[in-house]
Image (cartoon, rainbow, N blue to C red):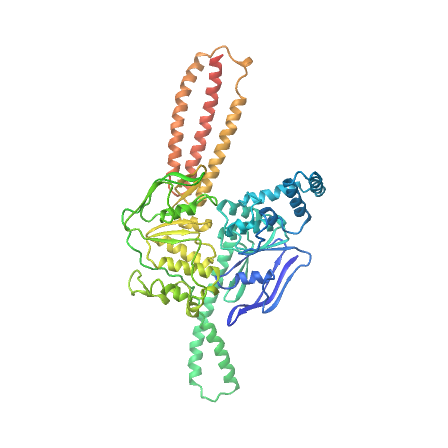
């Protein structure tokens, strides 16, 4: 059953053509992602589907019986509404009943009103729905449901809009960057939620794990054309590589043919017959094919880095609190050359605050931060560039420097040359800031940060709104960057590719320095949680196996006394082994196999230890008899 049909739509803004003759369909149960470079019209296409913009030509048709919900990058919510009211704004009887019930709870003196609201909830069997609503809001970190929308940050408002869409359970979801402003736990929950069988969705996202795990179709927009790729992100990459190889072969053939045709056309007299004219027209087509530039745009970032000395940054007993809320306490770390560290943790745990303290924009509540004399920060913040809308792209760069030194031979880069390396070429350099897409603004901001020749890069959510091409090149640059990198990101793929280890914000204001990437850290935490459950289960079993007073022996045999004494020494030795293994696991490097082997050893040792503790407990009970 087809839910959506798009036929030959086109969109231009003045002389700038975004796309033309775009056609595709979306079937029931299909999960498709739209992939394209920044500025190519992804958000515009979604706005056309949502009815917020009209195409210059073509048609968009939805199946009449279905309900469609759209998540915009900047949702429009009633600022005076509460979180719960905004989340339940979709038109359905259960939402209305739940809103009435929540209001009745605040006005319990109106017993009749409360009873009517209660009866309506009973009539609609809406109690399960209430549980689902609270689960979705809780998973998205929206715990204060009576808070006004006006008091929320932009990220929190987008989470409310996302919650509203998920709660309303539409037939088709259209999502523009749904993972922006979510922390890693929220993203993993959303990934599971959207992956449910039967759910139909079309989304724009740069989250490559999302594309890999959820999607069964990738729609690629490239140079105004649309290509449909069945399968997930891996399948998409394979098909793009195959297409580019074929196109490259075709271009080579066309170039060889063009050389022959060029020789022929130069020999012809000025007055040509019909046959000659037809051949000239064919030559123009061949020339067009042969003139294709198949080289991928490359964001070359060979900007010179300021020398970094041996003393970099030292954190000593660092503490930060806002009133009664303690974010971190007693954190110590000495940065080493070339380290690339990711920061993971829930929203509001203090990740961005740590970056601001290190860069001197915020004071710690305790402890001290020592910065080496040669450290030069490049700080990429979530707030982005703050420049007038009517300022041109090239002027933004020239205000910082006309020329930028770079590595190797070839002299300094001019502002224009630097912009070309950031994929701003030709007329794009003279575009006003207001006309740039979100991703283009981010790319320009990245350009201005790197212009200062930093040797310590601090990146706070650098992946927001960047297209996959820019992300790939930025990742390659960061992997080769000889200085230090400290990055906060919700992009798991980006963090796995870049980071040597993590600062993980955990409970009780503690930061764990984990030797590995994000995926390895999650595996470690899952293993740790499994071991905790196993210990709890063993304690319950041990308690159940305690001999009852009527079953107690009058005394231990001689062999049992020897066993009892030996067990104490064995348990003590096993405890030492466990501590040693746990420490080794923390310092075991970033290789997944090493971490898994150490975890298995720890699991086996824990099982052995628990068995001996149970036996010791049993013998001690008999000793007391």
Q: Is residue 556 above or below residue 501?
A: above
Q: Is residue 315 visible?
A: no
Q: Residue at x 61, y 44 (%)?
A: 133
Of 361 and 20, nearer the camera is: 361
Name the outermost residue toward the bottom: 271
- Residue 1 occupies which quadrant of the picture? bottom right
* Image location of residue 307, percent across then percent down: 28, 53
Q: Is residue 496 left or right of residue 43?
A: left
395 up-or-down from 624: above or below: below
Residue 288 placement (x, y as % from top left)? 47, 74
- What's the residue at 53%, 17% (across, down)? 547
Residue 83 in the image, given as x and y percentages of width and height = 58, 47
Kindly give the residue lying farthest to the top in the view shown: 554
Going 53% across and 60% down the picture, which residue do you hit? 43
On the rendered structure, is 264 left or right of 174? Answer: left
Q: Nearer the viewer, residue 512 or 63?
A: 512
Asked if residue 359 is positioned above or below residue 275 in the image, the reply reads above
């Amino acid at each position: 059953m087809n839910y959506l049909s798009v036929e030959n739509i086109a969109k231009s803004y003045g002389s700038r053509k975004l796309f033309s003759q775009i056609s595709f369909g979306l079937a029931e149960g299909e999960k498709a992602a739209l992939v394209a470079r920044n500025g190519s019209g992804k958000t515009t296409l979604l706005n056309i589907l949502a009815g917020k913009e009209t195409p210059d030509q073509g048609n968009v048709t939805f199946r009449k019986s279905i309900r469609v919900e759209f998540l915009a990058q900047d949702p429009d919510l009633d600022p005076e509404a509460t979180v719960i009211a905004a989340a339940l704004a979709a038109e359905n009887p259960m939402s209305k009943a739940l809103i009435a019930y929540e209001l009745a709870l605040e006005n319990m003196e109106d017993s009749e009103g409360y009873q009517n609201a209660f009866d309506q909830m009973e009539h609609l069997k809406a109690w399960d729905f209430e549980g689902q609503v609270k689960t979705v809001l809780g998973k998205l970190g929206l715990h204060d449901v009576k808070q006004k929308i006006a008091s929320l940050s932009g990220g929190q408002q987008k989470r409310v809009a996302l919650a509203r869409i998920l709660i309303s359970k539409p037939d088709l979801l259209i999502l523009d960057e749904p993972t922006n402003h979510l922390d890693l736990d929220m993203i993993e929950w959303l990934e599971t939620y959207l992956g449910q069988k039967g759910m139909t969705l079309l989304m724009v996202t740069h989250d490559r794990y999302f594309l890999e795990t959820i999607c069964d179709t990738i729609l690629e927009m490239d140079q105004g054309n649309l290509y449909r790729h069945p399968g997930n992100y891996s399948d998409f990459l394979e098909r793009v590589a195959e297409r580019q190889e074929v196109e490259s072969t075709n271009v080579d053939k066309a170039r060889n043919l063009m050389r022959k045709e060029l020789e022929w056309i130069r020999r012809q007299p000025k007055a040509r017959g019909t046959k000659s004219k037809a051949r000239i027209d064919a030559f123009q087509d061949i020339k067009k094919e042969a003139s294709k530039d198949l080289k991928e745009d490359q964001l070359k970032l060979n900007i010179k880095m300021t020398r970094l000395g041996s003393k970099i940054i030292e954190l000593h007993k660092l503490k930060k609190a806002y009133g009664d809320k303690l974010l971190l306490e007693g954190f110590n770390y000495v940065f080493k050359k070339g380290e690339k560290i990711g920061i993971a943790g829930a929203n509001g745990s203090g990740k961005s605050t740590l970056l601001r303290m290190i860069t001197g924009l915020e004071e710690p509540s305790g402890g001290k931060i020592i910065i080496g004399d040669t450290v030069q920060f490049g700080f990429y913040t979530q707030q982005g560039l703050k420049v007038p809308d009517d300022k041109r792209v090239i002027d933004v760069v020239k205000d910082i420097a006309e020329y930028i030194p770079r590595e190797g031979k070839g002299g300094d880069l001019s502002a224009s040359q630097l912009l070309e390396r950031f994929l701003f070429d030709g007329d794009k350099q003279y575009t006003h800031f207001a006309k740039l897409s979100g991703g283009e603004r981010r790319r320009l901001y990245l350009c201005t940060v790197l212009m200062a020749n930093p040797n310590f890069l601090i990146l706070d959510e650098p992946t927001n709104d960047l297209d996959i091409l820019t992300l790939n090149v930025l990742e390659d640059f960061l992997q080769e960057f000889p200085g230090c990198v400290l990055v906060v990101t919700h992009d798991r793929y980006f963090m796995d590719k870049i980071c040597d280890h993590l600062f993980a914000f955990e409970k009780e204001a503690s930061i764990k320095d984990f030797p590995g990437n994000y995926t390895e850290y999650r595996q470690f935490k899952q293993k740790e949680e499994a071991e905790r459950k196993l210990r709890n289960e063993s304690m319950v079993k041990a308690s159940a196996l305690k001999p009852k007073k009527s079953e107690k022996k009058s005394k231990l045999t001689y062999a049992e006394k020897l066993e009892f004494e030996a067990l104490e020494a064995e348990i003590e030795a096993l405890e030492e082994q466990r501590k040693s293994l746990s420490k080794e696991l923390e310092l075991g490097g970033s290789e997944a196999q090493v971490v898994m082997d150490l975890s298995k050893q720890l699991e086996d040792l824990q099982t052995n230890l628990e068995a001996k503790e149970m036996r010791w407990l049993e013998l001690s009970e008999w000793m007391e008899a």
